[in-house]
Image (tube, helix red, strand yellow):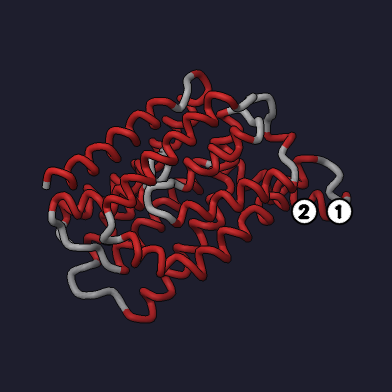
Amino acid sequence: MNPLHATVLGALQGLTEILPISSSAHLILLPWLLGWPESGLTFDVALHVGTLIALCLYFHRDIAELVVNFFSGVSTGFRSSASRLPLYLIAGTIPAAIAGKTLEEPIEALFRHNPAAIAALLIGFGLLLALADTIGSKRWRMDRIDLRTALIIGFAQCLALLPGVSRSGITITAALFAGYGRDTAARFSFLLSLPIVAGAAILKLGHLFKHGIPAGELQPMLIGIATSAVIGYLSIALLLRLVQRHSLYPFVWYRLLVGGTVLVYLFVK
């Protein structure tokens, strides 16, 4: 992979992994449209590591607070909602972790060369996001999250294995349907994604260390990490600021535009 491709795909990962528009869809569709070669394991590692860095940097205070609250809960019996939140995040992570371990590779093989299906998922789950943003009561905040809600959102996160769904998109959608405000839905979505992104990065790093970095791939890998981390951090800040005052409809319209464009392109091709 050349430096230009690494820069573009790294920036694309940082933007689309965070915003509710599906990183996996974009990382498949853009190379397909431009005729670029598929990225290998080395660059896949770079994208996950860059995203993890962005999440950890932006939410470092939240992470520290979760750790403190967890150990406080151990000594007090988890009586407060703040001390129970780390447990809910762990519980919500389990379904996606199991699904990812067993289904990621077959799903990727099924969708990698099926742009029509990806476009349909972009459109379908974009409309679902619009419905949730419209009818969700948006009453509850983070202190009202319970085990049932965490599990519902966690199971919804399993759908993010499908390119075109979006991890942040489906978890925000589920939280909105459950009655939580946009800002709470987005923040919980990011906190819930941390263990999954970290686990994926660790697993892929293990494979990379086992097989070694191919010749000429170190520079693109470092570029991918840097660009995805920087753009990812800025994207988190953008989304959390946007959801405080505005609806999620700009992302819905974008999903409809991209999905519709791909379907039209396939029809006239």
Residue that protrudes farthest toward the top in the picture:
245
Which one is nearer the viewer's eye here, 55 or 178?
A: 178
Q: Amino acid at mark 2?
A: Phe
Which one is nearer the viewer's eye here, 11 or 118?
A: 118
Question: How many residues crowd mark 2 within 10 Å: few (<14), some (14–19), many (20+)?
Answer: some
Q: Residue at x 28, y 33 (%)?
A: 257
Q: Residue at x 53, y 57 (%)?
A: 196
Question: How many residues crowd mark 1 within 10 Å: few (<14), some (14–19), many (20+)?
Answer: few
Q: Position of residue 47 (x, y in %)?
A: 35, 56
> In the rendered view, does 38 fall on the left or right side of 127?
left
Secondary structure beneath dot 1 equals helix
Q: Position of residue 111 (x, y in %)?
A: 33, 60
**Which residue corresponds to mark 1?**
75
Q: How many marks?
A: 2
Q: Residue at x 54, y 63 (%)?
A: 99
Q: Is residue 185 above or below residue 147?
A: above
Tell me the quadrant of the picture where the N terminus can be found.
bottom left
Q: Is residue 152 visible?
A: yes
Q: Position of residue 117 (x, y in %)?
A: 33, 52
**Which residue corresponds to mark 2?**
71
Q: Is residue 224 above or below residue 21?
A: below
Real-space CA distance between mark 1 and mark 2, rounded to the nearest whole angstrom:
7 Å
Which one is nearer the viewer's eye here, 229 or 133?
A: 133
> In the rendered view, does 65 fall on the left or right side of 167?
right
Q: Amino acid at mark 1?
A: Ser
Q: Is residue 229 visible?
A: no
Which one is nearer the viewer's eye here, 114 or 156?
A: 114
The reply to whether discs 1 and 2 touch (Cβ–Cβ < 8 Å) is yes
